[in-house]
Image (cartoon, rainbow, N blue to C red):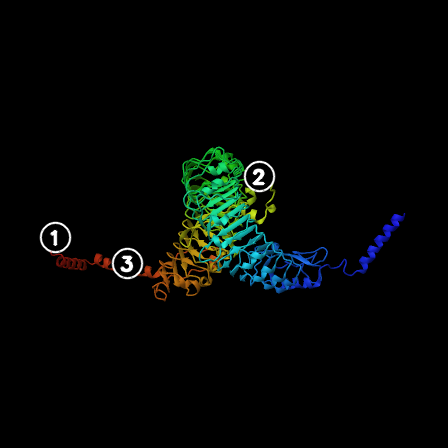
Amino acid sequence: MAVSRTSFALISAILIILSTNPSVGRFNCLNQESQALLSFKAALNVSDGILSSWVNGSDCCSKWDGISCNNLTYHVERVNLSAYTNHAEQGVQSGVISGSLCNLPFLKYLILPNIGLTGTIPSCLGNLSQLRYLDLENNSFSGIVPPVICQLSNLTYIEIAYNKLSGILPPCLQNLSLLKFMSISFNQFNERLQIAGFSSLEQLYARHFSFREHITSSELALPSSVKILWLSHITISDTLFDDLVELTFMFLSYCVLNISTSWIPQFQLGALEITSCSIGGQIPEWLLTQYSLERLRLTDDNIVGEMPSWLWENNAQLYVLNLSGNHLHGSLIIPNRSVEWMTVLDVSRNALTGHVPSVWPQYLQLLDVSQNALVGNIPPALCYLTHIVKLDLSDNKLNGYIPPCFASYKEIRVLNLGDNSLEGSIPHGLCPSSLSLRNNKLTGTISALVANCKSMKLLDIGHNKFSGDIPWSVGNLSSLQVLMMKGNRFSGSIPLELFQLKQLQILDLSSNNISGFIPNNIASLHAMSVAREDGHMFFDLLNPYHFFVRHSGIRSYSELGPFEKWVFEVPSHDELNITVKGLELHYPYILSTLTVIDLSNNQLNGHVPFEFGKLKGLRFLNLSRNNLRGIIPPSLGEMDQLESLDLSTNRFSGSIPAEFQSLTLLAYLNLSNNNLSGSIPQGGQMTTFENTSYSENPYLNGCPLPTKCSWPKFAPPHPSTSNIQDGKEDNRKQIPWYTIGLGLSHAAGFSCVMLLLAVRDKWRKKYFKWVDKNLKKLFPSIRNKRL
């Protein structure tokens, strides 16, 4: 009973304290610091609902998004807005760092990446003496890095890459004895970089600056603690690495390498990338001393010679090997004792010959041998790559058939067999996310292909020999973003279901035998109805997680740090050849801003639907070389993102819509070979085009054509637009009354003369006598001959 009474008394005392202490149970956040944060928020341009929890009078420590406080002192220690980047649909779009943020004296973490911040980095940040972690990556800061940053003696991490910073990096930064991570890449530093000191530095990212000439190794004195080194535009000698005994990951791009052939490094690398460094000659001999490589990329380095088998043999844990963009020749030979766990092999863009090997590491997930000179059939051995995610055999000299077993790949996302000489049909059930079979000799129909591929995003079967109608089941490809079918033998009409693909951004049906009308439901192409200003790659076909070593223990992509995420990234985009602005252009990347409709060189007829004007995001439109007629819809002038418009070689009549003057982005226009009339609009981009844009329109006048700016005497009348807008085009031909009247009058006069000669014998004899007399005068040689 005594224990119970004691416990009851203790609980009562605590309740009394809580009820009488006004600072307990209400707000932990200090008022001065909450006001500083509100002032900081006021200087940001945020989307509706973002940072809505930042409300005056609420507890900033427990209620405000992105804010963390000390559990004892309630001082703000962390400001993290990384969840509100301006690439998100909702986030912080722009702003500046308000000086009020410097009124957080106990701040330890300031994380503001990719939120569109502008202006300069405030000098008052030097007053945040407790700051350990500073991340201002991927904003638009300009000016210099304020030297007061050197006062932050507790700083361990500084990330200021991808900004517009200039001047010189403060030399005093080398005195930050606790600094372990420094990323200063992709800025505009125009003074020569000098990095020395940094006694605790472990990771250095310094690439792509505005130096007029390469800096040298002598200007870099790196401590032995460096483990990760990423440099560019530097002339490097082996003396740079004398003290780097702990170096594990090294990445060099656009460097000049003056490394002795006898150099033996003191480190053992786990990852090495040398890109665009013009190594020339053989693969560097010092790589013979490396036995711990897991990831190796030597790309675009002008390396010559044969495939080095010792790379496989010396590095038993090698699982990423990329030797693309060099001059390797000879046969592609995979050693029998190849690395068992290799997941990525890229030898594209070389000069390899011979057949595709029949032996492969069984756990390959990415295999790219494109742009070589490999010959023969596709070997059945590739069927056993059960983990393959991307397979690229394009741009070789392969023939034969597509193995049916390819349809059994369970994890395949990208399959590119284009630019070969493959024959036959497409195997039933083949359904990757991205399928490119362009420029082959494939035949048959595509009904089975499009029946159940709801997850397909890219289909390129251009320049083959496919035939038949475009199946209505193409509407089942609900995820499709790119459809390339040009240069085949498709016939029939365009199915209505095709324009129900809401994600479709690129549609190319050119150079076929397609007839009929353009469906009026074209405005259902939702992805082309929205103007996009961002230029990021549209496809996310390959998640980097697919290329992790399966026995590494990594279970999810989120477990990786920023460095490891980059290492495992594999380019996932596909490439396209698209005819725009009258030229066939090669697009190595497919951007979200690329929107195309190409129906040219077919047998389409009827009028152009007015609904085209609703495609506000369309940039390239080509309807040339068809039998389209009627007027050019004025609604095309509402497509304010349009850059290229080709309506040439059709039967359009009427005038050029005045609305075209508002197409401020229009860079290419071709209206030639039609029946257009009237004056060419003289506003906006219309005045910038050559006369070839308007040629072969006999009734068109005005600059830049040489025709005078006046209506021709017998110009054809304008067709009525009312029937066209109602979908009932007036098909009555315009009657040339003047020409008909002139012909009838000549016929009537000639008939009267012939009638008189027939009924009047005397007149007939005098007429022929007159004819004989004149013939003898004109032709003396026939005087003595009877006519």
Report the front residue among 730 and 1: 1
Distance, label 1 to label 2, CA atoms, is 109 Å
Q: Is residue 509 left or right of residue 738?
A: right
Q: Are marks 1 and 2 in contact (CB under 8 Å)?
A: no
Give the secondary structure at mark 2. Answer: loop
Q: Are marks 3 and 2 in contact (CB under 8 Å)?
A: no
Q: Position of residue 331 (x, y in %)?
A: 42, 37
Residue type at mark 3: give it: Ala
Residue 446 visible to the viewer: no
Name the outermost residue toward the right: 1
Residue type at mark 2: give it: Arg
Against 31, is 343 above or below?
A: above
Residue type at mark 1: give it: Arg
Distance, label 3 to label 2, CA atoms, is 92 Å
Q: Is residue 547 left or right of residue 466?
A: right
**Label annotation for residue 550:** 2
Q: Earlier in the sequence, mark 3 or mark 2?
A: 2
Report the front residue among 767 and 641: 641
Give the secondary structure at mark 3. Answer: helix
Callout 3 environment at 10 Å: few (<14), some (14 to 19), or many (20+)? few
**Residue under numbered circle 3:** 747
Q: Nearer the viewer, mark 1 or mark 2?
A: 2
Name the outermost residue toward the left: 784
**Residue under numbered circle 1:** 786
Distance, label 3 to label 1, CA atoms, is 32 Å
Callout 2 environment at 10 Å: few (<14), some (14 to 19), or many (20+)? few
Q: Position of residue 253 (x, y in %)?
A: 47, 50
